[in-house]
Image (cartoon, rainbow, N blue to C red):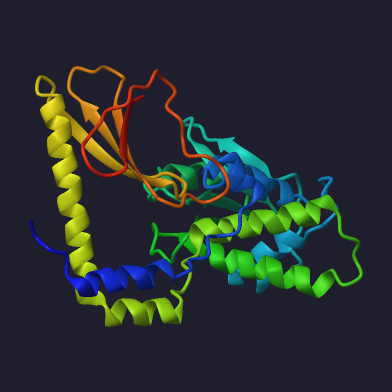
């Protein structure tokens, strides 16, 4: 039997003492819909409307417009002439996320969080230009997590830019404003957006640790890979009559690493193998299968299986 390198065992002890701070939870992340584009567009559109019940006037709208030089350079102050339109349907039955009708222009906003920008942008442009008044300018904005070239004629704004702009406005104008639930909701919304769209810098000590132990960590990763392959061989032995179609790796809320296995001829069923951590965190339990489950013994290790 092969022996484990003592340096790897020592490194494991070091790793156990490293604390990794999880992103702060928000009401959106708890509900499980925090990264959905429709949810974000709904909330953003609500706060962009100065006449809505949030009582924040044009704070969010103003924060957004200040990121557009084409708007701020205009001598006439920008004001909405109607409520922001959510999911404006074009003549081709396409849906624009948000449309802002201002006193001297119209702005179309397309919101992207976890999807690529492959929308029918030219159709969006044609629709907005056809509905704009004679001589009314049209601007097109693509909201993305990271800087992107985007399609021609579209202005790219990152969520980090928008978040910082809103937070700046909030810091400047709320020293004498009473705290309401809408301010709390807006802060929670911005925190949720930051968690999903802004890359956080790696902790300096963590980076130094990885750089100092890169070779040993690579060995650990290789061992984990070999272990997973061995487990899958055992699974295939149990399922000799059903070839494995696909395997998806998942993190179950810090409870462990799950392998979701799709097997040929199993219709809508699949198998989940969970390698549970020895010290699962407090908080929400991992996802539970929606169908009847069955445990499968796979030899050594804390691996459990289920059909779900």
**Is 32 on the left or on the right of 76, as rendered?**
left
- Say above or below: 183 vs 121: below
Which residue is pictured at 48% across the width and 48% down the height? 125
Q: For this rendering, which residue is in front, 156 or 284?
A: 284
- Say above or below: 169 vs 91: below
Can residue 301 be spotted in the picture?
A: yes
**Is 188 on the left or on the right of 59, as rendered?**
left
Which residue is pictured at 63% across the width and 70% down the height? 164
Residue 278: x, y in percent?
41, 51
Which residue is pictured at 33% across the width and 27% down the height? 306
Quarter of the image for residue 300 reads top left
Q: For this rendering, which residue is in front, 229 or 137?
A: 229
Can residue 66 be spotted in the picture?
A: no
Quarter of the figure that contains the N terminus: bottom left
Q: For this rendering, which residue is in front, 238 or 248?
A: 238
Residue 51: x, y in percent?
83, 48
Which residue is pictured at 77% across the width and 55% down the height? 184
Residue 87: x, y in percent?
58, 38
- Say above or below: 175 vs 92: below
Quarter of the figure that contains the C terminus: top left
Count of marks overlaid on the render: 0
Residue 197: x, y in percent?
50, 59
């Amino acid at each position: 039997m092969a022996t484990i390198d003592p340096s790897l065992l020592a490194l494991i002890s070091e790793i156990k003492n490293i604390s990794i701070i999880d992103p702060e939870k928000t009401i959106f992340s708890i509900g499980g819909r925090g990264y959905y584009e429709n949810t974000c567009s709904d909330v953003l559109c609500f706060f962009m409307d100065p006449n809505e019940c949030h009582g924040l006037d044009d704070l969010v709208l103003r924060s957004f417009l200040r990121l557009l030089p084409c708007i701020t350079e205009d001598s006439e102050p920008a004001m909405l002439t109607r409520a922001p339109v959510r999911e404006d349907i074009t003549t081709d039955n396409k849906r624009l996320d948000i449309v802002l009708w201002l006193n001297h222009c119209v702005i179309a906003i397309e919101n992207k969080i976890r999807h690529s920008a492959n929308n029918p942008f030219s159709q969006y442009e044609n629709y907005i230009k056809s509905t704009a008044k004679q001589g009314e300018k049209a601007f097109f904005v693509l909201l993305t997590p990271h800087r992107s070239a985007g399609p021609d004629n579209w202005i790219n704004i990152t969520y980090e830019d928008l978040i910082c702009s809103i937070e700046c406005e909030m810091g400047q104008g709320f020293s004498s404003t009473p705290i309401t639930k809408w301010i709390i909701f807006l802060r929670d919304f911005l925190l949720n957006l930051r968690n999903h769209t802004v890359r956080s810098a790696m902790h300096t000590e963590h980076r130094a640790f990885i750089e100092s132990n890169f070779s040993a960590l690579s060995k650990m990763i290789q061992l984990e890979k070999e272990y997973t392959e061995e487990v899958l061989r055992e699974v295939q032995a149990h399922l000799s009559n059903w070839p494995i179609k696909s395997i998806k790796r998942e993190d179950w809320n810090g409870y462990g690493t799950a392998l979701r296995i799709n097997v040929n001829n199993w219709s809508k069923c699949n198998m989940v193998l969970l390698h549970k951590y020895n010290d699962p965190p407090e908080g929400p339990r991992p996802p539970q299968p929606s169908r009847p489950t069955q445990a499968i013994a796979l030899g050594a290790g804390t691996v459990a299986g289920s059909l779900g």
